[in-house]
Image (cartoon, grey):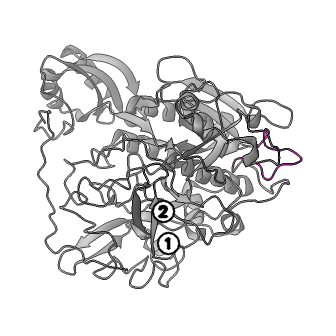
Amino acid sequence: MTRLPVPSSLALVLTFVLSGFAVAANPKLAHDLDTSNSNARVNVIVKVKAGANERALNRMKGRGATHLSRLDLIDAHLMNVKASDLENLANDEDIEFIAPDRQVTHTAYAGGPDYGWMVTEGLTSTYGTLAYDGTGIGIAMLDTGTDGWADLNNSSSVSRVVYKKDFTGANKPEDLHGHGSMVAGILAGNGYHSNRSNGTYWIRGYAPNANILNLKVLSNTGVGSDSYVIAAITQAISLKSTYNIRVMNISLGRPIASSYATDPLCLAVKQAWDAGIVVVVAAGNSGRDNSKGTNGYGTVTSPGNSPYVITVGAYNTSATLPTGDDKMTSYSSKGPTNIDHIAKPDLVAPGNRVLSILNAKSYLDATYPNNLVPMTAYTSSTSTSDTSYFQLSGTSFAAPAVAGAAALLIQKTPGLTPDQVKARLLKTATRLPTVTTSAVDAVTKVQYLTQNDLFTVGAGLLNVPAALASTDLLTGSAVSPTAVYNASANNVTLQFPTGSGVVWGTGVVWGTGVVWGTGVVWGTGVVWGTNVVGSTGVVWGTGVVWGTGSDAIEAETVSINGED
């Protein structure tokens, strides 16, 4: 395997001009605000200083801005503003920054005609009652919505979708897209339609008796906005005690446009984390993106760039129970994160050709009819007609595997904090060898190479039995570390937050030995040295990963198919 050194001429500052946009110079204005048409009105999120909410709001109204909604969770307001007035608003001493109400999308793509496993690998491969099934745990799902499927009922045929609200403005919390139903099935499906006497396995979720809170933030075309997501997070926090919401799944994202310290989505998920909710986020599907010369590195999307949340990449189980043929998917987004260089993803979970609940009246069903799962895929029946289950690939479906696992840990030990859940999941993850694997797109037949390094697989593969068996109680922070490039030594090390060194640095969580392979030490040593960089070219490219934030990797917009 070829190992290339970190480029000695690594550019730390990258000059970039956003084509077609006039980028404001005021540091309080986000670089991606479109001010090219001074007369155009734009929706913006205005973050104000703590305690200055009403004062700043009144002044903005006095300057011609229209108030759309409050985002008190992050001390912000959603405003409609004339582009020519943005500079004037930003000069207000009570305003910290102004960002566009950015678009978010789901992180799922169509798969090929083969059929993968859902829960069986890594949790259970036989029928029977699980020791832990998520009973009593509420999982807030921010997605395209979901409906009252039989797979989401309890043993009394009462729906476990205990709350629903549409934040898109359409007032239709049902799932007409299909993505949310699949995510819900992976989170908490009970396999009702596949639990047959002649069945080969159940298509059921990781926490098959947990309750789901349907917080719809994506439209029927799979598109939403930052403000929708923030409003839904606010609602989940307010309902935490009512429904025992301990876990939140966010299978959506957008390009990183600012540091997590000022990113509205990251600010919001941090509030949920601090409120005692384990937040699990999909990493994104841009691992094949080499448009910036980074071979897919630096493509994790927001809010997966938050160091607090659990960010999940997609793994390929090759549709078999034996693990010998498992490998990393090529499309799963890789770290470190743009701008802040946080080591992400935190871990990976099965996400390739996953089977879950189908909404037969959805956009996905109409658009991808070949992804319908025939009964022969999970029973001995000769019938090929079924409208119960669907197959898709993407980090969207790896994230709910981890969220469901978090629900099981909390059911077993209700007193666990989000940091303790994160630490257990990462510590017990199955370590993956530092090898290079190949994957072939199921449709285009293009081959891609992927290396199992820190910024591709994180701590390793989700291992639910090991996590449930663990009794470790973290006493500090489980904040994901920052990757730091040392130009003189020509390597990358991990920097941990002040006060967390005892947890992360001495082996309490990661162990004191070599985890990632020869020369790659997780904890206190070099993680990305001159002999362990990559297998497919210059990883760091021309400085995009280490840039100043003006050049965000674009989110994947073309279909990525399941892999062979």
Q: Image quarter for residue 62?
A: top left
The image shows residue 153 at horizontal and vertical percentages of 77, 34
In this rendered view, identify the residue nearer to me: 521 or 243: 521
The amino acid on which the numbered mark 2 sits, given as a three-letter code, is: Ser
The amino acid on which the numbered mark 1 sits, given as a three-letter code, is: Val
Q: Are marks 2 and 1 in contact (CB under 8 Å)?
A: yes
Label 2 packing within 10 angstroms: few (<14), some (14-19), many (20+): many
Q: Name the residue under label 1.
A: 503
Q: Image quarter for residue 64?
A: top left
The image shows residue 109 at horizontal and vertical percentages of 48, 43
Query: Does residue 203 show up?
Result: no
Q: What element carries label 2?
A: loop
Please give the name of the residue rendered at 13% of the width and 71% of the height, measured from the top-left corner: 9
Q: Is mark 1 on a helix, strand or loop?
A: helix
Say left or right for 108 vs 532.
right
Residue 355 in the image: above or below residue 290: above
Residue 42 in the image: above or below residue 559: above
Q: Does the magenta stretch include residue 110?
A: no
Q: Give the range drawn in magenta.
A: 190-205
